[in-house]
Image: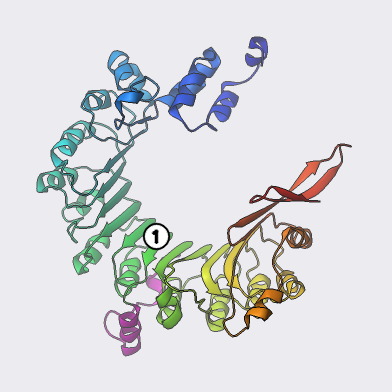
Amino acid sequence: MSRAQSFTLPIEIFSLIIEQLHERADYYTSALVSKEFNRAATPLLYRSLDSNISSKHLTAAMQPSRTLLSRPEKGALYCGSDPQLLNDTLKALSFCKGLACLTWIETAGENTSSILLRFLDVVRELPVIEINLRTHNDLDENVWSQLVQLSGLRKISVWSMQGPPSILKDWTPHLGTTLQRLELGVGTFCYPCTELIAQLPHLQDLRLKGASALAIPTIVSFLPDLQSLDAEFIQGVQYLRSRQSGSPQTPPSSGNHPRLTSLTVRTSMDALLFSQALWTWIKDLVPRPGLEALKICTYRMSMSHPIVPRMFLLEMILLHGDSLKHLALDNALLTLDDIECVCSNFTVLESLECAICLEDFLSFVGAMKNARTLRKLHLNFYRDPSLQASAWEHMERFNLEQAWCMMTVLPQLRVIVVESIHYEGKWVLDKEGKLQFVVIQNAEGDWHI
């Protein structure tokens, strides 16, 4: 691009181009190209501050603290921070009048509470709205006493494997009117946490690790604005027994539940295999229409594939058939009849992940024929243990030609993932300038036209 041509482009175009870069060194280089590139690259170069550097990388591109000390006006460009232990960062931080995020990471064996206190002294005077804490051991009491004085926060993320279960104590009165996102992972999760979270009625996004399945529905019922929930399925048998006995902790009526749009469930493969409680628990969490994404993540501990109950699918279709866009079942198995049911009744489904037993490709395509809005398909193959090895060898394997066939049958489908192999469909111009639809197999770089 010539200098004359560069002047004709709006500054917004330069920003869109440079935002595609990710390394600080690239932002630094872009800032040296021209005045126009400098105006676009400088805000990106000074957007985050990281003092975790080695002596081999003491450059202005990698460590902007020196520049900030000599040119404090650049601090207005900061919107995030990932501090470690570099002392001169403390002074540089005081110039970051636009700082919005503070992240603190402490590994096992470290005790850096005294240093974190120094950062908090600086951050208290800045417009921080997001706090992220990652520690192995519990933080010092002095640190907690300073943290709970921070107000106006919109997001808090605390992961402390040996932290106190009442980690939000004395903090909720300062956060009840502003906090919208909460991530809480502690080694021990007890009932006081349930009461504390209930004091945050404006939460829209909640992620919990360590809370029992019995506590989650109760917590959710106190959060009317909640839209996204990410939780573990722990002690599911106790939940099912409590529900069947009609104990006081049984989930309240659907009228008290928020209208969730996204639900992520993390559990073990054993829970999927042997517990009907999981599917009941999921239905209890989303009793109101409007769910757009359901994702199940399993810690795979066996080669088995649990079968998704048909009744669960039918009840989900009844409530969320017009809204569910993303269904990710990980290694849970769907039969061809189940797939046909899902594709025909989830009318806006855009992505599907599940395990299947592919014995006949044409039958599989037939089951998928009504997935007119599907854009991405992720398949995990199931090997039926009842089949002999010889029978398994003669079963059809999914290949590039079959991926092309499916993408031509389903008008919106553009990505197919089979185990670890990715197939992507796109329109390209051939040598004669005509459009052709091709499918690329990323693992090997093969094309099919």
Q: Residue at x 49, y 23 (%)?
A: 41
Look at the image and say whether residue 118 sits in the magenta stretch: no
Label 1: state its secondary structure.
loop
Which residue lies most toward the bottom here?
245
Q: Which residue is mark 1?
A: 226
* Residue 202 picture location, percent across and down: 34, 55
Which residue lies most toward the front here?
390
Vertical relation: 257 (above or below) 208? below
* Residue 48 picture location, percent across and down: 37, 31
Region rendered in magenta? 236-259
Vertical relation: 267 (above or below) 166? below
407 on left or right of 158: right
Vertical relation: 430 (above or below) 215? above
Give the residue type that dot 1 points to.
Leu
Q: Residue at x 22, y 33 (%)?
A: 85
Place residue 218 in its image quadrant: bottom left
Place residue 54 in its image quadrant: top left
